[in-house]
Amino acid sequence: MHLPTARLLLALLLPLSATAQAASELTVYTYPSFASDWGPGPAVKTAFEQQCSCQVNFVVLESSGDILQRLRLEGDSSEADVVLGLDTGTMETARQTGLLAAHKIDTSSLNLPIDWADDLFVPFDWGYFAFVYDTEQLPNPPASLEELIAAPDDLKIIIQDPRTSTPGLGLLLWLRHVYGDQAPEKWTQLKDKILTTTKSWSDGYFSLFMNGEAPMILSYSTSPAYHMAIDKTDRYQAANFAEGHYLQVEVAALVDSSNQKELGREFLQFMLTDGFQLHIPLKNVMYPAINLGPELPDVFDKLITPSEARYFEPAEVAKNRRAWLDEWLNAMTR
Amino acid sequence: MSDFTRAPLSQPGWQHWPGCLFALAIVLLTVSGAGALFWQAPALDIGDLWTSRYLRSVVLFTLWQAFLSVSISVLLALPIARALDRHRKFVGRALLLRLMELSLVIPTIVAVSGLVSMYGRQGWLTVAIQEWLPSLSWNLYGLNGIVLAHVFFNAPLAARILLQALESAPSTQRRIASQLGLGSLWLWRSLEWPSIRPVLPGIVALVFTLCFTSFAIVMTLGGGPATSTIEVAIYQALRFEFDAGRAALLALIQLLICGTLWWLVLRKGLNTALIPDRQLVISHARPDAKGVRKLLDSGLLAAFGLFLTLPLLAVLARGLPGLADALMPSGFADQGLQLLKATALSLGIALPAGVVSVATSLLILGAKPGNTNTPISRLLETSAYLPLIIPPLVLATGLFLLLRPKLGIASEGLALVALINAMMALPFVMQLLRGPLRNLDPASIRLADQLGIRGWYRWRWLHWPRLRRPLALGLAYGTGLSLGDFGVIALFGSPGNPTLPVLLYQQLGSYQINAAAGTGLWLMMVLLALFGLFNLVGRPPTKSQGLQAPMPNQLETSDA
């Protein structure tokens, strides 16, 4: 009874505004900053539409975590053909939903710090998590995780919640990779230096870090590239930590229930060409997934080069995520 | 009398049934939304509550911060309301009142960024105070920030309601007090306390619920898992971990605590007008509004005014450059156009949401005859408070699960957003309309009955003149709340077509920091414009029109 009521209300509220369906449309679920006017989305869309004579529709979800969530909610009735924006921390969980299809495309042009062989996921960019600091507030940043953890409590940092944000999860994995079972102990020591834990990267970066609230924030080693290239300032830099940095690879995949699989594969293949990748460095502010050669903006030469790429296999993350999260929660509420 | 001569819509059923149906629809919508989630949850693991340190700390912290927030908000609101009642004619009073009404609908992310500019580590107030008192170590993040922001949002609301209660004190008693020159203490005991006592439980319950279910504030100023509220924990369980079981468990605890509170308050018979209808009561000067008292009051009101305006001025200062860029001819092509498109979409969702919430409130209120304790009236009452305590995310996710296969086109999703937004505004809009709709004086009713003014005519000539102001304010609230929504829209939002809050988050996510500040300011300006516009609409046309029942208020005050 309630369902018809709701439907009736809906029908009353919005008189027909259904749009005509074009011959072939590709629906891509993605996150806001990718599809926004300033992200790579619009340029990529134009470029792909020219070669495929189809229409690309971005469905913008709240965050990359939401892409997975939405996929699970919708199950096999999803309207998505491609999901773009999962990462190595979440992709195994996505694989376990069984809702994705093999990509069957040639990934030989990939240029990542790790070897990549995966039948479901195609990387489209990558980067290292790093603490970005304000050189005016903090001329001498810690040179290692250990130094950060041992620093006096008046050094304040902003991090993100590992449950709602991929960089937040990245930090959790980073500490775990470096310290193993001692990670909870290290979190307890780090706790008093955490000014605040924000829901998403953007909440912390915009209203707090850029406002001078804390001299350091968990972000990407590539973030300074944006400030240097677009804002024309060297003020914000990433601290190079001696233990190495945790690697994030962002991936896309084909949805199994899609009836546009060929078009979807064409898009995934297009992802690994210049037409797509040229927009990654300064619009998604990450490293491109293929070698762009001289097309890579000069500012990328000024970024830090980690001594070691820290990385857990996605299956390892999926197996332990819940336990590691609970350890973190307990350490933080102690 | 035959049916032929009946006034339109004067059939008693017309007053009764639509309201009942709507109330039933709301309850069913809520129950099915939450139910879908419970059904999706594997099994409720209640043992989690005892074994997980985190869950225990979440529940305890939620209670503790809500208790602190409610205490400080109400303790601050009391003297403010008294001072405003004492001084009815000072420059900026109207402005201050308007600002207090606005506080409920200011989008959290915008206000929080203003609060940070004031009280953050680099906030100018913090810096200034630390200059004088270096030993004082103030940290905004954590309990401090949460309580401060809750007071910022709720003290004005509480003060506004209290002021309304004070103003309703019988004017004959006021006259006597004025003639006898009675002092402050006597006034408090004989006039003020009796008039605020009945509304106090309602205010406490309302503010407690708002702080208890607080989400965005805790998320931004909270500081970490140690300072999480239940609503935040629900969000985390649902959004990233897909842990429907934990979300359902937490939602149940929240429903239990807030539901019990409201049940206790409602059982005692809640005073009707929780949110003020703006009525200009011209009254006698209060004898205790002179001398030192006047000086103290001025200081208090000035401080409160600054407390409310300074963070908003900070938003203005930070947002102006970005907004100027967007609206300049050079930037207009993409950025400005994007802003206007988002504004249009936001209004396209918010205005219908406002209209639906006002219409539903009227129907539900119209269906409830007085304070009878029948199942029907209990259903009507429940439908009014349910949206306040059910987490919107739980509702939205549940409905999503239910409607998923059939929810085809984007516009259906948008209609659902408008519908849920309308529901969320319902408790506030209803409080606003309840008093004016009910408190019709017996003389007018008798007169209308004798003249056979019923149905549509009764509404047109009896209610409409008194209701147009509260209706306009209700529309402003309903529209404003929906305009700032970022939660429901994120789940059902449309492809690449952002509303203003979504646009704000998109800009934040892509390093567009100036543009984001500009969008935040723009959102505030649209809200202000809406309130101003509805205020104009709600203002009755000047003087005398045809058949208007005599208004005792006017009679009473004309001899002042």
Image (cartoon, coloured by chain):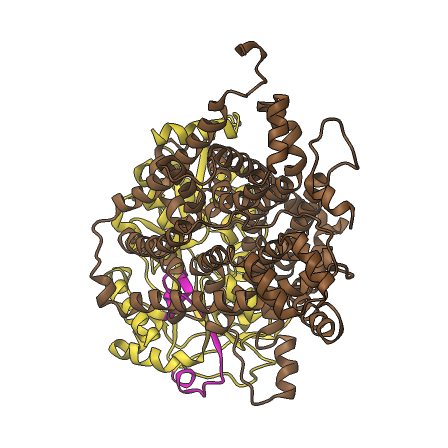
Chain colours: A yellow, B brown
User: Farthest bottom residue?
Assistant: B135
Q: Which part of the image, by quadrant, shows the N terminus of chain B? A: top right
Q: Quadrant of residue B543?
A: top right
Residue A237 is one of the magenta-drawn residues: no
Q: Answer with left or right where residue A226 lies relative to residue A271.
A: right
Provide residue A287's location: percent of width, then percent of height.
47, 62
Look at 23% across and 62% down and name the residue there: B48
Provide residue B265's location: percent of width, then percent of height.
42, 53
Provide residue B422's location: percent of width, then percent of height.
51, 41
Residue A154 is one of the magenta-drawn residues: yes
Look at 72% across and 70% down and name the residue there: B298
Look at 27% across and 47% down and name the residue there: A97
B396 or B539: nearer the viewer: B539
Measured along the vertical axis of the image, is residue B555 above or below residue A296? above
Q: Quadrant of residue B78?
A: bottom right
Measured along the vertical axis of the image, is residue B523 above or below residue A330? above
Measured along the vertical axis of the image, is residue A166 above or below residue A301? above
Q: Which residues are magenta?
A: A146-171
Provide residue B411's location: percent of width, then percent of height.
50, 33
Does any portion of residue A167 appear in the rendered image?
yes
B181 or B57: nearer the viewer: B181
